[in-house]
Every structure is written in C-alpha cells, then in structure tokens.
Image (cartoon, rainbow, N blue to C red):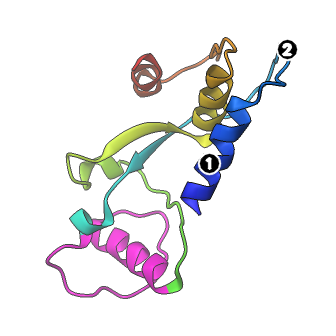
Amino acid sequence: MKDKWRTKYRKSLDRDSRKQVNILTGFDLALETHVEAEKVTKNTDQPESEIVEPVKSIGQLRSCIAYCNENKQNRSVKGKNLHEILPEESKKRIGGSAGVSANFLSNTGNYVAIYTPVLSEESYKQVKR
C-alpha cells in the first residue's frame, strides 16, 4: 500500500501539465515519535492485547502494539512524556498534515512557510531541521 501511494505521489509531481499557481493553505502541526516496534517488544513476554490511553508505561505501549499486530491495524496512541520511556533512537518528526502537505508543496516548486503565533521549543527544533 505504501509503495502504491509513493508511486502516485511521484507521478503527480512529474506532470508536465502543472500550472504555476499560488497556494495559501493551513494545516495542523504536531510532533510525533516513531518507534520500531521490535525495539520495544524484543525479549518480552506476549502482553495482553489492548489499546490503553493515555499510555503511561512501556508495558501499556507493548499492549497497544500487540493489539495493532493482532488486528492488522495502524494506530496512533496518546500519552504524556512518552520520550521518557521510549528507546533513545526513537525518531521525532513533524506530524499531522504539516509534514505531508509542506513536503508535497515544496516538491512542486512552491514556497512553503510555516506561521504560527505560538510554537513550542521542541516544534521549533523540528521545523528548523
């Protein structure tokens, strides 16, 4: 599925018929942490399969991963200060619609600017990367 989406995405960028247009759009900006499930579940007993929110411990996160694996679902889970329980090599990225929208627009040759009256220090670091 991911490869099909990427193929369509690239085709839309390669179109010769693109017209030069100005676009003003708004989208949400969220910080996401991406974790390889194997690094969280490796060398552990099979946890109970359930979605627990907010996630407050690595055990609860393992339960969410087990649920997603068992039900063949992709899910996002919410929790506070998850960075304290996640592996150090977890990747923080800009999430929400901001990443996809800004990336697509920049690949079409359009100028992308992010404006917000309030931006957390962590969000600022990610935008600056």
Q: Could you give the CA–CA distance between mark 2 and mark 1, rounded to whole angstroms?
A: 23 Å
Quarter the N terminus occupies: bottom right
In the depicted structure, whether residue 39 falls above or below residue 59: above
> What percent of the width, then of the height, locates residue 7?
62, 48
User: Which residue sits at x=76%, y=30%?
Assistant: 15
Residue 44 falls left or right of residue 123:
left
Name the amino acid, label 1: Thr
> What percent of the width, then of the height, locates residue 25?
79, 24
User: Which residue sits at x=14%, y=77%?
Assistant: 43
In the depicted structure, whether residue 2 falls above or below residue 46: above
Local SS, label 1: helix
Name the amino acid, label 2: Val
Mark 2 closeness class: few <14, some 14–19, many ≥20 residues within 10 Å? few
Q: Quadrant of residue 24?
A: top right
Q: Quadrant of residue 119?
A: top right
Q: Which of 28/36 is in front?
A: 36
Residue 58 falls left or right of residue 52:
left
Between disc 2 and disc 1, the foreground one is: 1
Residue 7's mark?
1
Q: Which of 52/90 is in front?
A: 90
Q: Earlier in the sequence, mark 2 or mark 1?
A: 1
Residue 21's mark?
2
User: Which residue sits at x=40%, y=47%?
Assistant: 33
Say if the magenta span includes residue 44: yes
Highlighted magenta segment, given as a residue range:
41-70
In the depicted structure, whether residue 78 falls above or below residue 11: below
Say if the magenta span includes residue 28: no
> What percent of the width, then of the height, locates residue 96?
61, 41
> What percent of the width, then of the height, locates residue 45?
20, 86
In the depicted structure, whether residue 15 falls above or below residue 69: above
User: Which residue sits at x=66%, y=42%?
Assistant: 9
